[in-house]
Amino acid sequence: QVQLVESGGGSVQSGGSLRLSCAASGYAYSNYCMGWFRQNLGKEREGVASIGSDGSTHYADSVKGRFAISQDNAKNTVYLQMNSLKPEDTAMYYCAADRLYVSAGYACRPTLWRVEDVSRGQGTQVTVSA
């Protein structure tokens, strides 16, 4: 059972940067798709980024060119570097992981995080003021 713990959220002004971290345990990178999604109260999840076991990365159009996902296998940590933040980036950000769906043939893409039963952390709040 994978465990995910996020950190690094906070409040910044528009144009600022934040780096989120996700400490993972209980799994092997080689078998998992990792990533981030965000959600506001009463809204649907929005997949933000994904990184496959081969290191391939994908992003939602809304963050492409501004956000970068990476992983440090030695530290079992996944990062989300967020630059040029906008007020519309305000949300609770969740780290997510999946092995089951990708093993069944689903692509490791941000859209995967819309599936309710993927593993996720408790979330970290990001607030961007104008």
Image (spheres, grey):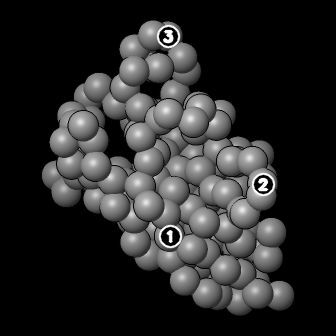
In the rendered image, the quadrant that contains the C terminus is bottom right
What is the x, y in percent for residue 40? Answer: 72, 63
In what element is the residue under mark 3? loop
Q: In which quadrant of the rendered view does residue 115 lie?
A: top right
Q: Amino acid at mark 2?
A: Lys
* Disc 2 target residue: 43
For the point 72% across and 63% down, which residue is it? 41
Number of the front mark, 2 or 3? 2
Query: What distance separates the C-alpha of mark 3 from that of mark 1?
Result: 30 Å
> Which structural element holds mark 1?
strand
Give left or right: position of 112 versus 72.
right
Write down the quadrant of residue 58 in the picture: top right
- Quadrant occupied by the N terminus: top left
- Residue linked to disc 3: 105
Contact check, label 2 and label 3, Cβ < 8 Å: no
User: Does 58 sit above or below residue 5?
Assistant: above
Q: Which residue is mark 1?
A: 124
Q: Is label 3 or label 1 in front?
A: 1
- Mark 3 or 1 closer to N-term? 3
Q: Residue at x 39, y 21 (%)?
A: 100
Neighbor class of circle 3 (other Cα within 10 Å; few <14, some 14-19, many 20+) is few
Q: Can you tell which of label 2 and label 1 is closer to the viewer? A: 2
Q: Earlier in the sequence, mark 2 or mark 1?
A: 2
Whether residue 9 appears in this view of the structure is yes
- Whole-percent x, y for residue 71 in the image: 35, 50
